[in-house]
Amino acid sequence: MSQFLKSSLSALGLIAVSLDAARQTPPTYPLKDFFRNPERGFFRLSDDGNTLGFMQPVSVDGQPPRMNIHVQALEGSQPVGAPRQLTRETARDISNFFWKGSEVVLYQKDFGGDENFHVLAVNARTGEAKDLTPFDKVRAGIIDDLQDDADHVLVSHNQRDAQVFDVYRVNVHTGASELVARNPGNVVGWQTDHQGRLRAAITSDGLNTSLLYRDDEVSEFRPLITTDYRTSVSPALFSFDNRKLYALSNRGRDKLALVLIDPASPDEEELIFVPETVDLDAAGYSRKRRVLTLAAYQTDKPRYRFFDAQTEALFKTLSARLQGYDFALQGSNRDEDRFIVAAYNDRTPGARYLYDVPSDTLTLLAEINPALPEAGMSEVRPIQYTSRDGLTIHGYLTLPAGREARQLPCIINPHGGPWARDGWGYNAEAQFLANRGFCVLQMNFRGSTGYGRQFWEAGFGQWGLKMQDDITDGVNWLIAQGIADPGRIGIYGASYGGYATLAGVAFTPDLYAAAVDYVGVSNLFTFMQSIPPYWKPMLDKMYDMVGDPQRDRERLAATSPALHADQIRTPLFIAQGAQDPRVAKDESDQVVKALRERGVDVEYMVKDNEGHGFHNDENKFEFYEAMEQFLVRHLKP
């Protein structure tokens, strides 16, 4: 089409997108294809590398399909024979699992989303299952799989005291349990050495944090480093002689770095690596070769710094085989010569492979979502804009494929946490909304993690204030770019993102034409009164970061959307899990009650068998179907 003809037609209002764009507009894909569980996924290798574990949805006794664990024999890098089903969960999907050696599989499950997880062990040959933590309303987790101990794992749980976690050595065959460390009341984290001995701990009084250390498991812990909570010295792993600690630390700097700490001189740090512009996320190491392998961090996309030539060569080999995709290693056998490889990009959750180093073979295990063609999905673009007070806000913009980026209906999607961050990659919600014709803006507002201590601290005391301004400034940036139609902007978020959604429609009611609050905080007073018991040791920290109900009463009242529901006039849809331990159902009930008392219609979906977000497929489908209808009705993409 000539530029003259295109301009003339646009001036006459006869076209909204170019003919080229129209030809490239993908079809509307079924909603369930975006959100259903994969037919096969979550691959894990047994220690000997001879058995593959994975999950797939299975209907048991006529119940809805749930993700259950299966195992399959391997010959080299090829699965052989028929898979065998190990578990028969019917209430909820198993969220994750891993191998203990080559004959036992461990997994966790909760009940209706209450997050009181039990640890279960399943014999991979017989299918016999054992609940290792069969305690009511107790939250358990695995600290160390004790790779060199065939019979035991270290488990922490809060049966003795709901607010703190003790550590036990548990027999995976019998369930017999032995106390290893009794929590004195202030330990919020434990660290083992390479022999599985409990050698370090993190304590907190709410505002100050100490790193404790001991030479062996019979000695008393002694404090090495004490800081206020704004300074982080978090142990990552012991040195390979078990005498020093690698840690992620921001002592004396803005960004988290990988450092080595000698307990004999804890005030000194040997700097191993610090990214220039962002925090370090994690450090990797080889158990077999006893070396550091890499450091992982995120700028606009995931990045790595390699410390080990063998690991760098492995990544180069896989990069050459998987061009156009990022990838992550999701596990290996004990010999570290077979790896589960997850390949993905922003337009697909990708595929999972088994890479066999000796034979240099990369075997496809599964496409995670073959129903959605990569070519039909939308690009996710890293973006940045400047807040009204001069901060650089980084984020991601998903523009609907095949549509001109002009005057689009847009969804603002602030992340949860809020002490977290959005990153680059495949996001089913963003792709679904883009497929329906919406642009999606995700921003890492101040208070988000990953951008250094100063940026994180800039969010303290700013719920509903400058943190919300950063979101509003993102909306205005979209409008100024000509991308967003100012009359068709919606906001959707979960958890803190749900709070930001409610704050958006309460405090900037003219900005949004529709809003979806998913398990969001609405009242900062009742929220902090209803937190789980194991959060209470950190309550002073929360008061300092969010606000003290007494000292900051006026500010918290001014920034609690439930207390300003009389200002909400934007069409609103709220979804809530009845078993949510983090954001109690009352947070949603308050807003719904206040709006309905005013005669304002608000859509409200409650699921009795869900917690902090919906996980069962049938509930996810119902939620996203309702959300789609709601957004289409009010924003008319």
Image (cartoon, grey):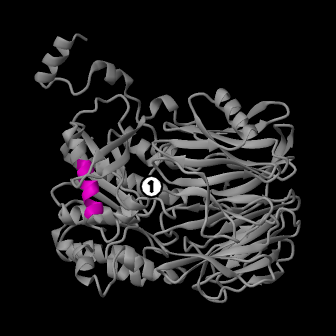
Q: Is residue 98 visible?
A: yes
Disc 1 crowd, CA 10 A, few/some/many (<14, 14-19, 20+): many
Question: In percent of the image, x 62 and y 62: which residue is there?
Answer: 247
Q: Position of residue 373 (x, y in %)?
A: 52, 32
Q: Position of residue 393 (x, y in %)?
A: 33, 50
Q: Which residues are magenta?
A: 466-475
Pointer 1 residue = 421
The quadrant of the picture occupied by the N terminus is top left
Residue 240 lies in what quarter of the image?
bottom right
Q: Position of residue 117 (x, y in %)?
A: 64, 73
Question: In percent of the image, x 88 and y 62: which residue is there?
Answer: 126
The quadrant of the picture occupied by the C terminus is top left
Q: Is 406 located above or below residue 415 in the figure?
A: above
267 lies left or right of 526 = right
Residue extending farthest to the top is: 2
Q: Main secondary structure of the magenta part?
A: helix
Near-viewer residue (251 or 564): 251
